[in-house]
Image (cartoon, rainbow, N blue to C red):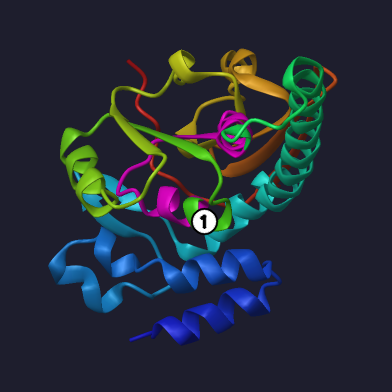
């Protein structure tokens, strides 16, 4: 039986970032699987969860999270928040000096409200048990995270496990067409295999955004830069298929 510390060492030896390793350390994989599989929670292999769905192999999850480049998104978000909040404060200050020569007492509240509206948005299609949603939350805490899953049993279970996590919304629906309602997203992760490159989701991705998707037996990283698509393929993976319709 592989222990959690052994799995963390294995992932660290693969060269994954400290933030990814820390997320795997904090999130309990055993909370997202059935009782009879808990002894296998930290084996580096996929495990069945319900109706043919699986919780992916930890290495594969870490690989896909790495391709999402969440660290870059976090750094960019922090810089943008700092610039926007500073600009907002300056504008408020100048306005109030002209009006009554003093800074309003609720200026801090307004600044915080401005920051909260600038949170990065992440979508996971085929969110399954909710394990990856929890990992993303740990890596990129200041974000809005959406999961879409067609199996109601998994949606109900994942909502229960993640009920204490703020800013995670899980929707019971078929995710093949994405989730246009809350788009555009900074990052889209497709955690089940699709038959071809998901071009139909490009419109739901922000410029400078990234889609990471399993396509048949490969993982693709798809970047949208200045409205041009750049993609890389990483072959040699196996996923359950994403159901269309």
Closer to the camera, 57 or 75?
A: 75
Disc 1 on helix, strand or loop?
A: helix
Q: Residue 42 sits in which quadrant?
A: bottom left
Q: Reply above or below: 67 against 110.
A: below
Residue 36 position within the rendered picture, expressed as x and y whole percent measured from the top left: 14, 70
Q: Which image quarter is the N terminus in?
A: bottom left
Residue 188 position within the rendered picture, expressed as x and y whole percent measured from the top left: 56, 33
Q: Is residue 105 left or right of residue 144?
A: right
* Highlighted range, magenta: 108-136
- The residue at 34%/26% (across/down) is 243
Q: Reply above or below: 96 against 36.
A: above
Closer to the camera, 177 or 184?
A: 184
- The residue at 61%/39% (across/down) is 108
Q: Residue 200 sits in which quadrant?
A: top right
Specify whether residue 59 is painted magenta. Answer: no
Specify whether residue 113 is painted magenta. Answer: yes
Residue 126 position within the rendered picture, expressed as x and y whole percent measured from the top left: 38, 36
Is residue 136 visible in the rendered image? The answer is yes
Q: Residue 56 sits in which quadrant?
A: bottom left
Q: Is residue 2 left or right of residue 82?
A: left
- The residue at 23%/73% (across/down) is 38
Residue 241 position within the rendered picture, expressed as x and y whole percent measured from the top left: 40, 35
Label 1 environment density (alpha carbons within 10 Å; few <14, some 14–19, many ≥20): some
- The residue identified by callout 1 is 61
Closer to the camera, 156 or 110?
A: 110
Is residue 215 visible in the rendered image? The answer is no
Q: Is residue 9 left or right of residue 207?
A: left
Q: Which image quarter is the C terminus in?
A: top left
Q: Is residue 225 left or right of residue 243?
A: right
Q: How many marks?
A: 1
């Amino acid at each position: 039986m592989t222990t959690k510390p052994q799995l963390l060492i294995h992932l660290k030896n693969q060269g994954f970032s400290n933030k990814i390793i820390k997320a795997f350390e904090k999130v309990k994989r055993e909370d997202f699987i059935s009782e009879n599989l808990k002894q296998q929670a930290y084996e580096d292999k996929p495990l069945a969860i319900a109706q043919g769905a699986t919780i992916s192999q930890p290495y594969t999850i870490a690989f896909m999270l790495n391709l999402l480049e969440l660290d870059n998104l976090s750094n960019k978000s922090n810089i943008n928040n700092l610039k926007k909040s500073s600009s907002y404060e300056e504008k408020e200050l100048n306005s109030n000096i002209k009006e009554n020569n003093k800074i309003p007492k609720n200026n801090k509240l307004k600044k915080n409200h401005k920051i909260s509206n600038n949170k990065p948005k992440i979508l996971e299609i085929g969110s399954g048990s909710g394990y990856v949603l929890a990992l993303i939350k740990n890596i990129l805490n200041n974000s809005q995270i959406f999961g879409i899953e067609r199996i109601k049993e998994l949606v109900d279970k994942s909502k229960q496990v993640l009920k204490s996590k703020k800013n995670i919304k899980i929707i019971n629906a078929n995710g093949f067409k994405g989730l246009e309602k809350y788009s555009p997203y900074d990052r889209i992760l497709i955690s089940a295999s699709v038959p071809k490159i998901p071009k139909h989701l490009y419109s739901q991705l922000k410029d400078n955004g990234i889609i990471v998707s399993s396509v048949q037996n490969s993982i693709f990283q798809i970047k949208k830069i200045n409205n041009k698509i750049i993609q890389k393929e990483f072959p040699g993976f196996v996923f359950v298929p994403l159901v269309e319709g």
